[in-house]
Amino acid sequence: MAKAGHLDRIMRPLHRWVWRDHDRRVRKLLAFAEVETDGGRDILRAAELTPDPLLRRLYLEHAIDELRHGDLFRRRGASLVRARRVNPTRLFNGNPLPGGHGLDDLSIDGEPDHRLLAFLHVAEKSAAGRFTIYREMVDDDPETREIFEQILRDEVFHMNYTYTQLARVSPTAYRRHVWHARAKRMWNRYLRVAAALAGAIGSGMLTAMYFVLLPPFAWLAKRAERREPTGWTSIAPHRPDAARSQY
């Protein structure tokens, strides 16, 4: 049984605010569709690279599930779009932080199976906790709730099989691999938040400089312009900057 994380429980009011709006709900579903589809492609690549026959079969099943999830989210989002036109000018689309399976933080090529399994376990556990919250947020939409219930069952299976296989592949250090994957995922989230915050601060400082520092310089330039004579100004031939030819 999946349990929502402590942070997701704290942010429950924010989740409710996001999902109660039709436009944000559509954007969330379409964003999930992209994330699930991209994750499915990455796991397909992992199935091609792993030398373990059992993991190859499990990765293939996992990838098929992810691609199917993406299709479910995409179809539901398209259905809601057809039901009512989505306003594309909303300031907040309900997806402030990148989410999904975290495979954007991990290069599939050249990664050992134990690292990929640990990363997948942490990501699937986090996704299952979030989908548990999201399922409660869409009680007014039975079709969307059914999709979350169906996907949540798959996420729980993915969470369990990755942990079981990690213990099989690395029986002496599987707990350490899980903690390392969790720490790396948190660090990458911190870097994304810090980059977004730095971008916002930089934009604010540039805007302040534009409205505070630029007007005095513009005023001085206009003042100096008024002192200059209009039209062409003659230059004495003996001056060093006088033009003596066309070249």
Image (tube, rainbow, N blue to C red):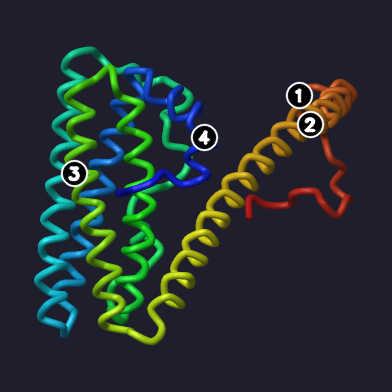
Residue 52 placement, left or right of 184 = left
Identity of the amino acid at label 3?
Gly
Residue under the point 31% across and 72% down: 116
- Alpha-carbon distance for marks 4 and 2? 41 Å
- Reading the chain from its start, which is encountered first: label 4 or label 2? 4
- Reading the chain from its start, which is encountered first: label 4 or label 1? 4
Question: Mark 3 sits on what residue?
Answer: 70
Quarter-wise, where is residue 53 in the image?
Answer: bottom left
Are discs 3 and 2 less than 8 Å apart at CB? Answer: no
Identity of the amino acid at label 4?
Met
Residue under the point 25% across and 44% down: 34
- Alpha-carbon distance for marks 4 and 3? 25 Å
Q: Nearer the viewer, mark 3 or mark 1?
A: 3
- Reading the chain from its start, which is encountered first: label 3 or label 1? 3
Numbered circle sitting on residue 11:
4
Identity of the amino acid at label 1?
Gly
- Alpha-carbon distance for marks 3 and 1? 68 Å
- Label 4: few (<14), some (14–19) or many (≥20) C-alpha neighbours in 10 Å: few
